[in-house]
Image (spheres, grey):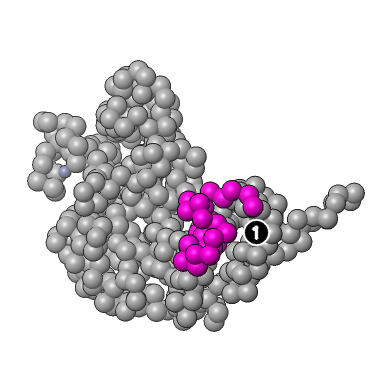
Amino acid sequence: LAPTPTDKSGTVGRARPAVTEDLRRNNLASLVRHLHLSGPLSRSNLTVRTGLNRSTIGDLVGELSAVGLVQETAPPSRAGAGRPSLVVSLGPGRVWALSIELAPETLVAARVAPGGRIEDRLAFQRDWQAHLAPEMAASVIADLARELIARAPRNARLVGAAAAVPGIVRREDGFVHLAPNLLWREAPFGSLLSGHLSSPHGVVVANEADLAALAESTRGAAVGCPNSIYISGNTGVGAGIIVQGSLLAGRSGYAGEVGHMKVNPGGRRCHCGGRGCWETEIGAAAILRRAGRKSKDLRPAVLQVLEDAGGGDAAASKAVRETVQWIGRGTADLINIFNPDLVVFGGNLREVVLASQRALRTEVRRHALPQAGAEANIVVSALGPDAALLGAAELGFSRFLADPVGVLAAAG
Ligand SMILES: [Zn+2]
């Protein structure tokens, strides 16, 4: 028997049913996780990746196939080759995660399949300046979720749910302390949502930048980087920080509020009560303010400033240049503190950084310590506007990925 990465007990072969059961569950989880992260894989590839032997892989695939979680197909035939190894993939439409994203302008609910494939999505557009009570948001999302459930394939089972919120969220129970761009303070959103959805396992609520960071490191720009920082900049600015492959949560899940670093002591008042926060210098409102513009639709307006700057408009160019200087200063501080492999920019900052990558690198090098500054790559989000939604799906799938057959059975 080949040694397996999941065999930590050292008791394989002894008559200890509980241990054997644990080992089997871990092996099933390992196989499903590989397919979830890498897509379809041949049996021989799975053997290499999991460290399990061929007959064990055959047994596990058989068990997963019996409950519809995987399917096998013959690879394209090659003349002269030996008997080809069957390709294993996660069966379509068998399980899904309910992924929710709250943004100031829109509430989104999506049916996401393993492998991070968004199979269905429903959105509720709203006036971002109008107040949206947490109870109302939970009720709207529950309606969207019910419609998604009704539209899902008959055989599909919902195995988890998570929501991304642009605010300071207590991970334990999804309590939102502050979501300034939703005008929320002290909102028990996690329990409201779980109540409305009557989900047996509740809905995990997390900060949107944290979830986007998780998605980028799982299947986006930061794959293979153990240390990365995802900086999300829209109306507000936040970060998800991955340290040694794990999301930095802090004591209660509040870590990563980089938008409130006091970068400019003489700067503007921030809605958090502080002054000169990074958000007041690099958020969407700051770019528009510098360009001398006003708009209700922040994202299109920011994109217009970038386009005009590219076309030679002096005020727009100056606005972008100054904003990039502030982005560079704050990023340099983060690089000095965390020594990441990679800094990923998302939200509106994705486009700002794309338009000024060279200027930003110069600015970062000017302010960062030479060693850490030279080691950190600066890139933009590979997943774009879906990053937080896909991160919520990863969180939604976490129980399933730990025990695929058990969680499927419990889902009926
Ligand atoms: Zn602030």
Residue at which label 1 appears: 57
Q: In x, y percent, where is residue 158?
A: 45, 73
* Observer able to see residue 364: yes
Residue 194 within the segment the image draws in magenta: no
Ligand 1 image-quadrant field: top left
Helix, strand, or loop for circle 1?
helix
Residue at point 70% right, 65% down? 72
Report the front residue among 101 and 281.
101
Judge the density around disc 1: few (<14), some (14-19), many (≥20) Cα neighbours within 10 Å: many
Residue 187, relative to residue 362: is it above or below?
below
Horizontal side of residue 344 vs 219, given as left or right: left
Q: Amino acid at mark 1?
A: Ile
Q: Which residues are magenta?
A: 1-30
Q: In x, y percent, where is residue 169?
A: 23, 56
Residue at point 43% right, 51% down? 215
Report the front residue among 285 and 221.
221
Residue at point 75% right, 55% down? 85
Horizontal side of residue 268 vs 34, given as left or right: left
Q: In x, y percent, where is residue 8?
A: 48, 51
* Observer able to see residue 289: no
Report the front residue among 21 and 87.
21
Residue 257, relative to residue 355: is it above or below?
below
Q: In x, y percent, where is residue 79?
A: 89, 51
The residue sitting at the front extreme is 14
Horizontal side of residue 299 vs 154, given as left or right: left
- Image quadrant in which you'd find residue 172: bottom left
- Image quadrant in which you'd find residue 139: bottom left
